[in-house]
Image (cartoon, rainbow, N blue to C red):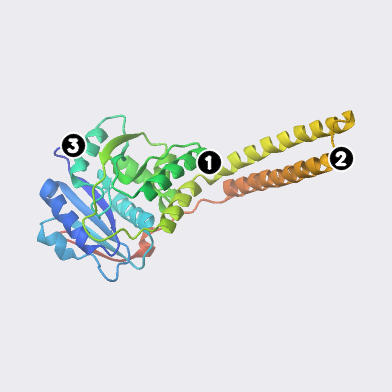
Amino acid sequence: MDAESSPFVVVTPIFEDAEASARLFAELSSAFGALVYVVAVDDGSVRQPVAMEHMDAVGLQGTIIRLRRNVGHQRAIAVGVSYVAEHFPQATVVVMDSDGEDLPESIPDLLAQLAAADVDLVVAERRARVESMRFKAFYAVYKRVFKLLTGRRISFGNFMALKPNAVRRLAAMQELWTHVASCVLGSRLRVVTCALDRGPRYAGKSKMNFVGLALHGFRGVMVFAEDVLVRVGIASAVIGAFTILLGLATIALKLSGFATPGWFSVALGILLLVFLQTGTLALISLMLTGVSRSGAPTHTAYTIFVDAVEHTQGISQ
């Protein structure tokens, strides 16, 4: 695959951001012309819906999928990826945000690495960020907690390039509807990272607040719920075994006459409470893991969220 001349599809979610998306359309058209086809997912916008005129005005070929309601950033991407898997099964896909933070001029770097025969998917790892110190601190803590709970390293977001087989695989995974990056980690695809800078927003302010970011992070962990539960169960069992050893040591000190009055009962009582709590937590974790494994897999049909599909002039799907 020649990254410089091969056509590709851009999937981008948009929510109340018509001004920024119009600029993205113009930059994509200017940089790639007829090589790019855009699938814009309007995530239930009411005040600033995406206008087809913005694509037509710059000569960009594409489709706007208008959703019945706001489903969230990750589900909007899932709708777009599922649409492409159905209508463009052999297409190379680039997933990117529409606000300017994912730079169109970085797309050739992703596609160049995607051209390798042993690569299915290329993700953008941020080299320079323009966010606040609060966000950077939260993200640093989140990455370490994510690694501790799931055993996996996460250092990328939604900006990525995918080969057709990767698009079809992600579209078939229910985890895509929860968290795109975690879905990629669990897909077992051959993934490489590409260090890229993050750009400033084209217009307006981010609609994601701190609570939304925290919820997004928790959803990423939820994709690996089984792994988390097993790790919690193992940790609880280890702590329980440690409390038993400390309890035996406490009894030995009491029998040897080294324990001060009242110390033995307090220490043993505390250790007993710790043991009961960790034992209960370990049991619950194992039970939830069994429930999770026995549950039948479900997959969301993207069409139930779609209100209308519009195409640029001369395009019909």
Pointer 2 residue: 261
Alpha carbon separation for disc pair 1 and 2 = 41 Å
Q: Pick the quarter of the image with the N terminus.
A: top left
Give the camera-side residue of 213 and 54.
213
Q: Amino acid type of disc 2?
A: Pro
Residue 254 place in picture, x, y as percent: 86, 33
308 versus 241 height, above or below? below
In the displayed structure, does residue 91 sit left or right of residue 286?
A: left
Give the camera-side residue of 171 and 27.
27
In the displayed structure, does residue 206 sit left or right of residue 7?
A: right
Q: Secondary structure at mark 3?
A: loop
Question: What residue do we see at 31% from left, 54% from top?
Answer: 80
Q: Does the rendering let one see residue 308?
A: yes
Give the camera-side residue of 68 and 168.
68
Question: What residue do we see at 26% from left, 50% from top?
Answer: 101
**Nearer the camera: disc 3 or disc 1:** 1
Q: Answer yes or no: do the residues labelled 3 and 1 have beta carbons within 8 Å?
A: no
Q: Does the rendering let one see residue 314?
A: no
Residue 72 place in picture, x, y as percent: 38, 60
**Nearer the camera: disc 3 or disc 2:** 2
Q: Pick the quarter of the image with the C terminus.
A: bottom left
The tag on residue 149 is 1
Q: Amino acid type of disc 1?
A: Leu
Crowding at mark 1 (Cα within 10 Å: few <14, some 14-19, many 20+): some
